[in-house]
Structures are given as structure tokens and as C-alpha cells.
Image (spheres, rainbow, N blue to C red):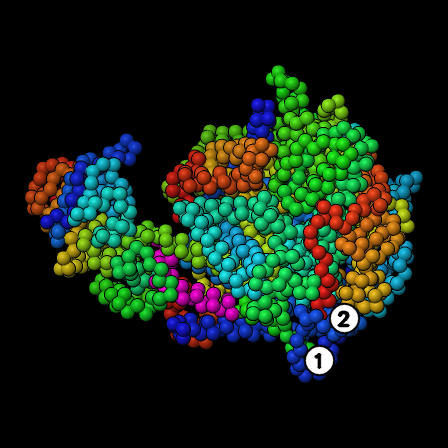
Amino acid sequence: MDILRVEDVNKSFGGLRALNNVNFSVEEGTVHAIIGPNGAGKSTFLNCLIGRLIPDTGSVMFGDISLTGMKPYEINQVGVSRVFQTPEIFGDLTLMENIMIPALAKRDGEFQLHAFKNVASDAEICDKAMHMLEDVGLAEKRDSIAGSLSRGDKRRLELAMCLSQDPKLLLLDEPTAGMSRADTNNTIDLLKRIGDRGITKVVIEHDMHVVFSLAEKVSVLAQGAIIAEGKPEDIKGDPRVQEAYLGGAHL
Amino acid sequence: MSLIRKPFNRRSILRAGALGGTALAMPTVFSSRAWSQGYLNEPTGSTVTLGFNVPQTGPYADEGADELRAYQLAVKHLNGEGDGGMLSTFSSKALKGNGILGKKVEYVTGDTQTKSDAARASAKSMIEKDGAIMITGGSSSGVAVAVQALCQEAGVIFMAGLTHSNDTTGKDKKANGFRHFFNSYMSGAALAPVLKNAYGEDRKAYHLTADYNWGYTTEQAVRESTEALGWETVETVKTPLAATDFSAYITPVLQSDADVLVLNHYGGNMVNSLTNAVQFGLRDKQVNGKNFEIIVPLYSRLMAKGAGENVKGIFGSTNWHWSLQDEGSKAFVKSFGQEYGFPPSQAAHTTYVQALLYADACERAGTFNPCGVVEALEGFEFDGLGNGKTLYRAEDHQCFKDVLVVKGKENPSSAFDLLEIVEVTPAAQVTYPPDHPQFAGGALGTCNPGA
Amino acid sequence: MDAILLQILNGLDKGSAYALIALGLTLIFGTLGVVNFAHGALFMIGAFCAVTLSRLLSLSFVTIDETQTDFLGNPLKVETPYVEAWFGPETGAAIIDWSVPLAILFSIPIMALVGLFMERGLIKYFYKRPHADQILVTFGLAIVLQEIIKYFFGANPIPTPAPDAFAGSLDFGAMIGMDPNVIIYPYWRIVYFLFAAGIIGAVFAFLQFTTFGMVVRAGMADRQTVGLLGINIDKRFTFMFALAAVVAGLAGVMYAPINSPNYHMGMDFLVLSFVVVVVGGMGSLPGAVLAGFLLGILESFASMAQVVALLPGINQIIIYLVAIVILLTRPRGLMGRKGVMES
Amino acid sequence: MLGLNKKDTSLFLLVLVLVVLAPFLLNPFPENSELAQFNAGYPDLMQRFLIFGIFAIGFNILFGLTGYLSFGHAAFLGVGSYAGVWMMKLLTMNVIPAIFMSVIFAGLFSLLVGYISLRRSGIYFSILTLAFAQMSFSLAYSVLTPITNGETGLQLALDDPRILGVSQENGAIPAANLFGLAMRESYELSLGGWLFTFNAGYYLCAVVMMIAFYVAVRIFRSPFGMMLRAVKSNQQRMNFTGLNSRPYTLAAFVISGMYAGLAGGLMVAMDPLAGAERMQWTASGEVVLMTILGGAGTLIGPVLGAGFIKYFENIFSKINDNVLYGWFSALPEGVADFLVFVIHPFIGKGWHLTLGIMFMLIVIFLPGGIMEGVERIGRLFKRKSSDKDSSARASAAPAE
């Protein structure tokens, strides 16, 4: 069953057609990768999914909910989380707080005036945050300020933030960009581990090593349109993909 | 500048009884009505403290500085230093130059910032911290009314300083407050006959009015008194207090068929609106076959200085001017001039006289008790403090005296010689019944000694 | 009709003051990214340059005239300005009379120096600090500057008239065939408007046609990149700060005859000029000029008796009302780029 | 205690002790000494410390936590004051209804202003709030004179109805009171050369301020407070995390508006007059200065900042040359003249200059405000006493 179904989505900026009749669907419980050269419209596409941009035409269905026109926080509340290309975290807050906020958002909804509860005595949320930090290996830094983390740690933190919401669909925008090989492998392991929880994942990735380690299905986006789709090994040999990447040697 | 070298000891002896290290708790007396027990801040030592609350920051700071100079001079004279100033010309001879009731006069100063809130805070600190028995000063009606109400509540005397709005002794009058300055009504009443003589009975007036309380009462006063002699009021327009450029208000005057412009403005507003009006050539204009004229109901020398050349030939009224030739004025100008090197402003005169009058009232009452002072000042008639025979009316605590109609001087001989006296309007002509509609509402209440 | 024409004239005049201040403000914001609350103080200092020069020119020596007496009855001290003694009474008087235009030359080096000291001594340490800190420190500086001026010149306005040649007013109405005396406008205000237009033109031409200006404009668009090109952008920005100070100062010098300068005139203009900058669009120079004129004209119309009769108090709040409407409907301002300062 | 953790409890108790003992602490100099000029322990100023403390605490909930810099908070204080005086005119001189209505009206007004202004952020938000406040001030000063009494300020009159009280007692307006306890009632205690004043109004302010402070601490430590800090840190992320930041900021705005109203209500309870100037943008600027000077985002910083500014305004403005000569009377005349000459520009009418210089110095050298200074001194002290602590600093955390 498809958890996400995108139909005929178009998006232009001025004269530039960023997305051109994109049709796309993701099967529940799978890992689906989107690859494509720079400027192919990958990030625009993700932005259309999470409400940061509103598509000019077309529809985005999440299960039987239409995401088109919904506000970003509403989209998140129905179960879509996103990890950004440059980590979006709460840089002035501690790691614990960084995780508690999404956890609270999941439990209490988009707005709750808990002005008199003590956040530190909310055992459920604290435990959950602690577990998440342990999961991503940041437990010992729980009281550090998130802004002081290394880039790799920030990514892991952001991932943990998203996971703490138990999303139905997790969108990952180049989760390993700029990481060392070792860090990349760690991240792949981590993502595989969370695959066990049955979270559907859409990954945008440059690094084919990551794509082929994780993805069950791959879509290729070039110049705003999906030009190929299929199992990773099929995509590898597709001439159109080769061409789109203009001799991308690492294929 | 003269500096008085006196160590500053507040209520020093007042607490002397407690000096042995014994702790006593005593309720103070701020609110109960037990009159015979004394009164708030009763001076029990050898000194008495007065509170001079003047604008030291903000646009009226220069006026405040002049007020403060006059107060310091008054304190000197009261304490028997200097040449005694008006003490020698004052018709009441109760003051002997040995302080007040034998107590040396000391003072504290504060900054009103020309804001009601700040002025009250400053007055409160003088009353609560420094033990001031009387508060005086200020340079706007809003401040005067606010501080007057505070002094009534607290139980000290308030001598109002510069405040020209009718309300100070009209709907906002208070038993503990007295005003020496004249008011909007008096300005109108004094100006009208002079204007009639100078400009005729058939005039069309256009009013620009500062959009706040004082502006309203002044506009009303001038309008009513000029209409009474046949003038027509074409239009009255309110201008924002914050306005600096009045061109947008001046140009419509050109379009109307008015031949007189009345600027109910004071301070920076007046300087700017008058400057703008003259720049727009209003005074060179002929309307209805008559020369276009501008009137500024309330003049002050400091403002005239700010407007420079533009005041030449423009009528207005003022409380007092240093060129007056009566003995009292001459004595004051001399002693102020010797002290500071320039002649005093009307603000300086008002505050100097008020300090003296308060001291005199204490002497005559034989007490600092505000209720005694009020009794001594109510209905008090005197002479020799400038402006001729003067009455502090009991019904509303307004002072009635001659009002000066002045005009910007064409050929000033010095930086201070900016206004010339056109007429000294006798007190009788500016006197009004206490229940005059412009002063309706409010009540004095009863005096409050705060004890 | 003529009433409306007059209000447009008024608005242009008021608008040129707003535009000049806002121009410098937005120049500083656009180049340096600094919110400068002391900009109004620069305008005020400019006006006091005119006051200072006229005082300097009227510096006098004292002779005692035994035949006359002063108010205390002492022999009168007659003051004769040195310039009158040196150049003869007539030339001397003319020099004093022309002190405001002369102050333009006098103020340029002074304002440039003030700007230089401000930027090198204080502002440059605040480039990386939050806007709130910039506002606070420049606000503190504004208070200090105005208190210093107050200490030396007092709180009272100081009349600083334009040369006699510019007294009087131009009968516009008669020129365009209407009745005489219906639309007259003071010469000095016309001079002010032309002067402002000239300054604005000069600043734009400078930014448009010089290499220096191009680098600065590039820096306004993207500071890092220009920095990477190896161009010492900091030095140029210092120059821009000084330039902005000179523009504000000149606006002040020429404004002195319109309203007698006082120490708080900068604060009076500060809030308004910020509103002008925001309405025009933060960092947009043409926006600042356009918004300055627009708000000047709107303010003039709102002060018409007919309008006030319809909507009491509108003349007090029109500028703020416009600011609110613009910010809600077009948050980047009239001509601003999107996303500037939207934290 | 009271649902606070140990550290907050000790902070709360410290503030409590300071507030209760303020009449002693603020009058450190004996009555007769020259330094008595620097005593601040008289009722009006002590009340002002607390009232502006409340105002700044409230402002800090908005600015310190969410980073939204409002330049219009004085308007809420003003609206609160007007509401309070009207209650005293119409209903009773008991301060409770007045304070209550102040909070309600300020809350409603801030809801309106906040709803509109919070559509924008950054400096645009600041300008919107500034515009609203300036409009309120201009109108209150002029057109709204029938409601606000304009320039003079709204005050009580002998012929006010006061339905639940009396219009006048023996020709005087009755005193503002709390169930019969007049706010201006004071007890004075003479101890040796010292004089201490204990004022009923001050202690009412103290109780209210401790409640306000307690509520602020709870908000800082609550999930709501954490969300507000998240707004400041990264509003984007917040939105993509399923949180609607608008109601959070609006709630913070209204809460801080209500704090401002509370301050306004207390102000009229202590001194029943509401002047329009309290709504001017400079008054809003003042609370911004207080908060940043003290340390934005810290719990007691804003209170310290408020105290700092009010102390300057009330104590420095009252020092005149006469007082200076009193201090230096022991010195030779020439030296005294010189000292007075040097100090003269900074005192009395020059207190603005001193204040301006202080702002600049603090912002330049202590960006975190007074609290950063305290922290630095504390650290210095710690380093001296034990070297091993020197590295452990990171968790000293942002919210102190």
C-alpha cells in the first residue's frame, strides 16, 4: 500500500520550472531513494512535501490525507518528519531539550499552554529523550548546548529529534553529506537499525554507496522530472540516468 | 555662579531623640487626621527643607535652570545673605532674613522631566526621603496639576511655578496648592482690548492649538474674549504636540480668508510654528484689505529668544518682565543680575516670589503647618513683588494681579531685550468670578496637613 | 485644488528631510548591517554645526560705551564681531548672514570625522553583535551626544536664520497663472528641497558610476563574496559610514533655518526615520527616498482641517498607520528585498 | 519547594530575603552622613524598584525567551494604569479590583496588538509594536482626553462616584487601600543613626512581585517556556517539528502584556494617577534597556536592570552642586571647586549623560548584562578558590 502519493506536481519560480509533472509514490515500510544531479529539484520536491513550498498544481496525498495547502506543523502532526541537508536543530538549547521538544509536540499536539508543568519532572518525555540520545550515541552529552556539537553529531541529533516523534514517514535530505566514510557508515547502520521500527523513509542522496546500502527503490529526478524509477540495480544500468549525470563515474 | 556651601543634612535633628541607639517603632502619620499631633515633615531642628522640583532634562530644561537660580537666590535672601532682593520692597514685613520662623532654609532639588509621572516621583522622594515641607516649581500645567494633587494627598504645600492652564485653579484646584502665575483666561482678557485697539473690531481669526489640555483652555479663553469684541473665529485646528514642522498647518491659513493667526503654542511648538508662519510670509500678506497679523497668547522671554527675529512686532501676554519699573521688580532684577549676570525670566520671577510668599505665610501663621499656611495665604493681599497690588483669592487659590501685554521688540538692545511692554492690564480687568464657566467643576477640598 | 497643491509642496519639503535621514540610515544598514539609533543625533549635530559656525563668525570683542547703560545701570558693553572689524561692517555682516550656507563647507569635514570616529571607535565592534545590542549601544551614544550638545548649547531652541536673500517667499500661484498669494512658498524651503534632491542624486550617482560605489553595492548584496575577492571592504564601509554621517549632517545644517535647532531634534526624527526606512524597505536606497516623500506628503494631507474633522487625531497617527498597513500587506517594504531582517 | 528545583528554590528564597529586608539594605548610610544622599530606602523608590521589576520580568518572558523585541510594552502598562484609575474612580479605593482590571485590560489590549504584530518577526515586529504604542500615546495625549485626561494624566476627584466606597472623606479623596490598610501607611524605625521605613504599599508590591517572580520561574522551567526558547533558537525547526509557533508567541506576548498591566495597576495603587507619558516609546525603550542591562533571558537580571535605571533616575537627578560642596566641605576650597567642576556635568541635570555612558559601557563590555558581570566575578572567585572547577563551565546553562 502506498503511504505517499504525489500526482502531477508542478512548481515554478518565476520563469524557472523546478518541478515538471512529478508523479511519485512510496510504499509503506520501504526505503525509497531519490537521486539526481545538482539542481534537479530534489530539495524543492521535499519542500513541497512538508509544506515549506506550495505546489502550483497537483496533489500530495499522505495515506488518505491531502497534504497540499496544509501548514508545515500540521503535516508534521499527521506523521511526516524531515531531516534537513544542513542540520536544523535548536542551537541554543541542550541536547535533552532538543529531543524533548519534538517528543512533546508528538504527545501534546501543535500547541499546549503547559506554563505550570515542570518540564524536568515529566518522566515520560525525559525517559523517551534519554532513550533517543542513547540510540544515537549522544547520551553523555545530554546537557551540552546543541550548537556546540560537531556537524556529524548535529545530524545525529536531528535524526534523533525526528525519530522521537515516531513518524510514519521520514524524509532525509542528504543525511551523510560532508561526512567522513566512517561517519557515513555509522549513519547507514543507524538508519538500518531504525528501519526495524517500520518507519517509511524517503532519502535524497548524492552518495551512491549510501543509496545502494539502504534503498529498496530508487527514483531519478532530473530537470524537475522523474526520468527513471526502479530497483537500485536496475537504475545503475539505465542509460538515461547515466546521461543525466553526465558521466557520473561513481555509478 | 554662586554656590552655597552648606553641608546637606536631612532631618538631622528631627531624629535626634532616637540617637541613643534605642530602637523605637512609631507609626507615621501620613493619613490620620489628628491635626493637633503635628503635621507631615514638621521641622523640629534648626533647619527647614524646601523641595524645588523643576525640569532639568527635556525641552524646558533652560526654563527649569532659571527657576532653580531664582530659588537659590530666594533661599539666600531668606537666610539673610546677599542684598535681600524683594524682601525690602515686599509689603509684608514678617520676614527678617533669619530663615523661616528662625529656622535656616535648606533645599533639595529634583527633575520633573516635564512628565507627570516623573514629577510626582521626584516630589514624592523629596517628601518621603528628604522631609521637604513644601514643593514648588515646574514648567507645564500637566505637571503642576499632577504634583498639586500629590501634595494635597501627602499633606504638604504646593506653590505651582509655571502653569498657565485654567484647570490648575479651575477644575483641578486643590486646597494645598497656590498659583502665582496668571492663566489662559487672564491672557485672553488682557489681550483682547489691546488687540482691538491695534487691529480693529472686524477681524477673522484662525487658531492653531497645541493638542493638549493647556492648548484647549488657551484657545477657549482667547476665542471667547476676542469674539466678545466682535472678532470672528474662522477655524480652529489642533496640532500634535510632537509636530516640529508646522508648514502643513500654516499653508491652509493662506487659503482661508482669515486675517489673524493665533498660535496657542508654547515652548518648542511655539518657536517652530511662529518661525514657520513668518517664513511663509504670513506677515507680509494683505487679507480683506488689512495687514495679516500673528498673535502668541503666552509669551516667555526664553521662547522669544528661540524664535529670534520672528517675534518682532508680535503681541502676546506675559506674567512679568524684567523691564518693569516698580521698586520690587527693580530690586529683584538687580539682585538676580548681579548674581548671574543677566536679567531674570518670568519663570525666575514667579518662583522667587513664590518662595518668598510661602516663607512669609509661615511667618505670619507662626507655623509650618500646611493648614496654617493655607489660612495665611487665602485672601492675602500684598504689594511690592512686581505686578502691583496682588491678591491670593481664597475661593480658588488663584493669584490676581496686573497682567502684561507685550510685543516683540523691533530693535532689541541686547540678547535679553526681546519684548517690550505694551500695556499693563490692571488686575480688575482680568478678574473673573470663581464660578466662571471656563473654571467650572472641581473643588478645593480641605487642607491636608498630612498628619 | 490649490490647497492640495500646497500640501504636496509641504509634503515634498518634509519628505526631503525624512528622505535624507532615511537614506543615511539605510545606507548604514545595507552596508554595515547595523541598526544605528544614533543617526538622528548626527542630524542634530549637523544642525549645531550651523549654530557653531554662526557663533564663531559672530565672535566679538567688547568695547565699553559710557553713554549707554545696561539693565543693571552699568555702562553698556558693546560687542562687535571680529569679522566686522576685519572686513568692514558690511562685508562682515554679510558673512554672518550667510553662515548657514557657509556651514555646509564647515560641516562636511566635521561630520566625516564624527562618522569616522563613531565607526572606528564603536560601531565596528558591533558588526557581529545582535541587533538589540546595536540598538542599545547606539541609543546610549545618541543620549550621550545630545547631552553633550545640551551641556554646551542649552535646551532652548537657537534661532539660526537663513541669509536675508532667502527671506520671503515665492509666489507659485502667480507663476502658473493662478491668483497671487494663493500658493506661496518660502524660498528657503525650495532651496532645501533642491538641495536634498541634489544630495540624493549625488549619492546615487556615486554608488552607480564609481568603482568604489560598485564595490559597495556589491557588498550590500553579498558581503562575504566581495570579501573573498580580496577587496578590503571594511575600509570602504568605514567610508560609507562617514558618508552617511555627512548626508545626515548636511540635512541638519540646511534644516536649521526651518526649525530652530535644539538638542533633542534628533530624537524627534529618529522614530519617524526608522518608520520611513522600514516602509521603504530595509537596505533599499530608492525605497528610503520614495517612502520619505510618500510619508511626508501623506502626513501633510492628514493635517488638513477637513481630514482631521472627519477622522479626529488622524494627523497624530497617520505615519504609524501607514507603517502598520505596509508591514502587514508588504512586509519587505515598498522596494525592499525579500527576507532582509526577517530573522 | 513549591515545585521548584533546588537551585531555583534558593534563588527564590534569596530574592524573598532581599525584598523583605530591602528597607534595611537600601538605607545603608546613617541619616546624618553625607552619603545619606545615596540611600534609596524610601517608599516611593522601593515601590518603583518592584513595580518596574515586575514590568521587566514580564517583558523578559517575551524578549528573553522568544527573542521578539517589542518596543511597545509601555502601552500595556499605560492601559493597565488607566483601567486601574477608572476602577478607583467608579468602584472603590480598594486596590484589588483596580489591579485586577489593569491586568485584564492590558491582557485584552496586548491580545489585539500581539495578534496583529506577531504576523511579522525581527525588526518588523519591533516597528509594528512601536507604531501601536506611539499611536496609543498620541491619542491618549490628545483626542482621547475625555477618557485619559490627556496631558495632566487621569486622576481621582472629590466627586467621583465610587459606588462601593465613598466619594470623599472630610473633604479629601480617600486613600488607596487594601481592605482598609492604606497603601501610604508607613512605620518608621529609628536605630542609632539610621532610619528605616516600612511601607504598607511596598509590602503589597513585594507580595505581588514575589508571586510574579514565582510564576516567571515556573514558566521558565515549563514545557511552554522551553517552547518559547525554541522559538528564539530556531523557529523553522519548530514549525517542522509539528509546533505552531504563533500561539506560543502570542501567549508569551499576552502574558508579558499582563505583567505590564499588573505593573501599571500597582503603580496606580501606590499613586493614583495615570499619565500618558508612560506609554511613550521612550518608556518602552526603558524596559528594553532594563532587561538587556540586567541580562535578557535570565531570571533576576531584569529586576536588577530595573533597579539600576530607577536608582539613577531618582538618586542621581537629585544631586546638585550644593550637595557636592557638602561632600567636599572638608577639602580645601580650590580642590573642592575643581572636583565639583569635574563632577557637575554628570549629576543633577546631567543624569541622562551618566545613564547614557553606563548603557554604553555595559553593552560594550558586558553583552550579557549585569548578570554576566556577576557570573564573571563568580567565576573569578571560583577559579581562585579551586582550580579543578575551571574547566567545568559548559553546563552553567543559558537560563540563569
Residue B250 placed where, x, y %? 65, 32
Residue B97's disc is: none
Q: Which residues are magenta?
A: D207-234
Across and down, in percent, residue C108 comes to 60, 37
* Farthest top residue in view: C177
Residue B43: which disc?
Answer: 2
Residue D343 at least partly seen: no
In the depicted view, which residue is nearer to us: B192 or C340? B192
Q: Does residue C198 lie above or below B438 as drawn?
A: above
**Labels 1 and 2 within one chain:** yes
Q: Residue at x 47, y 51 (%)?
A: D109
Looking at the picture, does residue B42 appear above or below residue A83?
below
Quadrant where the N terminus of chain C sits is top right
- Disc nearest the viewer among 1 and 2: 2
Q: Earlier in the sequence, mark 1 or mark 2?
A: 1
Query: Which percent across, then down, holds residue A10?
Result: 22, 36
Q: Chain of mark 1?
A: B
Is C106 within the magenta?
A: no
Query: Picture quarter containing residue A111?
Result: bottom left
Amino acid, disc 2: Pro
Residue D382 location, x and y as percent? 45, 73
Determine the residue positioned at 79% across, 46% down: B432
Which residue is rendered at x = 73% and y = 26% of the image? B284
Can residue B438 be seen from the camera position used here? Answer: yes
- Magenta-span inclusion, residue D210: yes
Reading the image, the residue beneath label 1 is B18
